[in-house]
Amino acid sequence: MDLAALPPGAVPEAAPEPGAEPAPEPAAEATPETPAVPAPEGEGVPVTDDAAPEAAAPATDDPAQEPPVTDDAAEDAPSARPQPGFSGAVDGVRTGRLPSIGSDTAPDAPAVAEEPAPDAADLPPLSRHAVAFDGAGGKPLFSVVLVDPGGPDVDRQALADLPLAVTIAIDPTAPDAATAAEIYRAAGKEVVMLATGIPAGATAGDLETTFQAHQTALPEAVAVMDLEQGGFQNDRPLAAQVVPVIAGQGRGLLTWDKGLNAGDQEARRADLASARVFRRLDGEGEAAPVIRRYLDRAAFKAAQDGFVVVAGEVRPETLQALAEWAVEGRSATVALAPLSAVLLRGR
């Protein structure tokens, strides 16, 4: 039918059904909780804080129907990436520094006082001038003390070169005492001073003067050795005065295993390092074979007591016997040691 040929008003307009609303454009993915409502033409859809961020905008074919996002909305929208720290200043909170525990400034750590190493000059002569001893290795200690009688017949250099740990006793009143001690000390030998020059009826002041002179002559002596005959060890009143002087100098005491030996008793009472000579090797001019037998007996004594001290004089026969015994005798059963090792045993 040609509608143009109909007279005006012949085709009535279709009236809309009551209550009928225009059908909305189909949404791409509409959620049931938030139905899409078409916006009036020409007006944008504002983005508000109440809108769920996961709700999708309705899709339309008309680009004008897409809700534009304004700059203000973009600024108000939270960033997808979290920002660290505070967004502004907070009263009472300091920023820009690492957290600390306690006060702002940590107190300095207290200084730990280190104990200074003992100075060798502060040690007593017995410890300061003792020859180094590696140890007995479980063997009993065997100490040999040789008395230097002085005079031109003594070959001190040969004695110093003796490959044995012998200790040399020197008369501090001899004019060449300091020279002799220097030779022996340079060869690694220990020296002790003989208790010579004690006046008869000596007072405490006399003893102080006497032993001060001895110390000046032999400052590196580790001990005082009493005389075999005419010494102080069997005179108790004299021994009671001598022992404190020796202790005051920091030296040990060597006496002879004879008589009551008040000197050794006083030394033990004063806790002074002390020892006794078990045997004289050459008191009657013994030959080398006899001296070697004496040395074997002394080794047996050392095995019983754990240590022994023997004494002799610097004589060719004595030195020969010592050299032979060190190779062929019972020396392998003992540890040849300087006198200081015996004096300091157990200390």
Image (cartoon, helix red, strand yellow):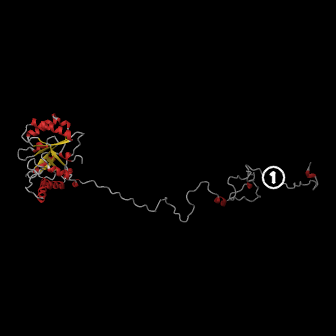
Question: In the figure, 117 relative to 314: above or below?
Answer: below
Query: Residue 185 at x, y = what percent?
Result: 15, 48
Query: Residue 33 at x, y = what percent?
Result: 73, 52
Give 286 or 120, whichever is nearer the viewer.
286
Q: Secondary structure at mark 1?
A: loop
Question: In the figure, 50 relative to 148: above or below?
Answer: below
Task: Give the amino acid at mark 1.
Answer: Ala
Q: Is residue 300 visible?
A: yes
Give 37 or 139, whichever is nearer the viewer.
139
Q: How many marks?
A: 1
Give 96 or 161, whichever is nearer the viewer.
161
Q: Residue furthest left?
A: 152
Residue pointed to by mark 1? 23
Q: Is residue 222 visible?
A: no
Q: Is residue 145 left or right of residue 25?
A: left
Q: Is residue 141 left or right of residue 230?
A: right
Q: Residues within 10 Å of mark 1 (few under 14, many from 20)?
A: few
Q: Quadrant of residue 145?
A: top left
At x 12%, y 60%, the residue is 205
Q: Residue furthest top?
A: 328
Q: Is residue 309 left or right of residue 16?
A: left
Query: Residue 48 at x, y = what percent?
Result: 69, 59
Query: Residue 281 at x, y = what percent?
Result: 11, 40
Q: Quadrant of residue 241?
A: bottom left
